[in-house]
Image (cartoon, rainbow, N blue to C red):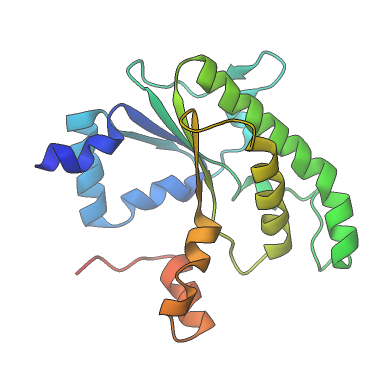
Amino acid sequence: HEYEEIRWGLNMTLIGDGHWSSFMDVDDIKNIVDRMNKKVNFKVMCNDNETLATMYEEERQNLMVALPKACHKVGISIGSKELNDPGLVTLNDAPMDEVRRRNEPKLTQKARILKELVLTLIRQNKQVIVMIPPHGETRLEVHTQWEEILLSKLRDIRFPSIKILNMAQIMKGTRSECNSNSEYLDMWLKPHPRPRQ
């Protein structure tokens, strides 16, 4: 029975920024990940400081992350560190229309590079899951525009070659389950999760 429950992670590797490392923050989840590593070759290979520039060499169309040979599925999370780029402006710097206008070329370039990375993996016969990281309380305008641009850029790559896990949408779908905005944000963004009961 356990194999059936974890088979979704068969020969799967998670790469990108630190969102995936949250699997290792809670002991019972870490134990599941460790068992999955042994039984279905499930790997978490992420780095809190990972950016597109450290993951993908655009000029040579080369993935700079050494995926395991048996890897058939790749989950990519990019955005948390990438969107803290000091070249991106926020509402602290300018009004919303100017923020969007000034950030659009930079975010479009980042989305284009991520799309090239995805297409490179697909050409290597990999299934790809792109996770759009959740929005936090800061730089919301940047995250929202990134989500819009990235979804637009990836829309011509069809399932089953790509799957998109949009954490912002998943989070919004649970808002009604909480009594307040702070409870909602704590549920999703609290830095130190409590162990499951």
Q: Position of residue 34 (x, y in %)?
A: 22, 40
Question: Residue 19 vs residue 107: left or right?
Answer: left
The vertical placement of 151 against 116, above or below, is below
The residue closer to the viewer here, 16 or 157, is 157
The residue at the point 26 percent across, 49 percent down is 30
For image coordinates 44% across by 65% down, the residue present is 191
Could you tell me which residue is drawn at 69 percent across and 51 percent down? 148
- Quarter of the image with the C terminus is bottom left
Residue at 44% over, 27% down: 127
Viewer-proximal residue, 135 or 89? 135
> Relative to 64, does residue 109 appear above or below in the rendering?
below
Q: Nearer the viewer, residue 152 or 171?
A: 152
Q: Quadrant of the N terminus?
A: top left
Residue 53 appears in the rendering:
no
In the image, residue 188 above or below residue 182: above
Q: How many marks?
A: 0
Q: Is residue 66 visible?
A: yes
Percent of width and height locating residue 49 = 56, 42
Q: Residue 192: x, y in percent? A: 38, 66
Q: Residue furthest left?
A: 1
Residue 168 image position (x, y, % from top left):
55, 59
28 lies left or right of 188? left
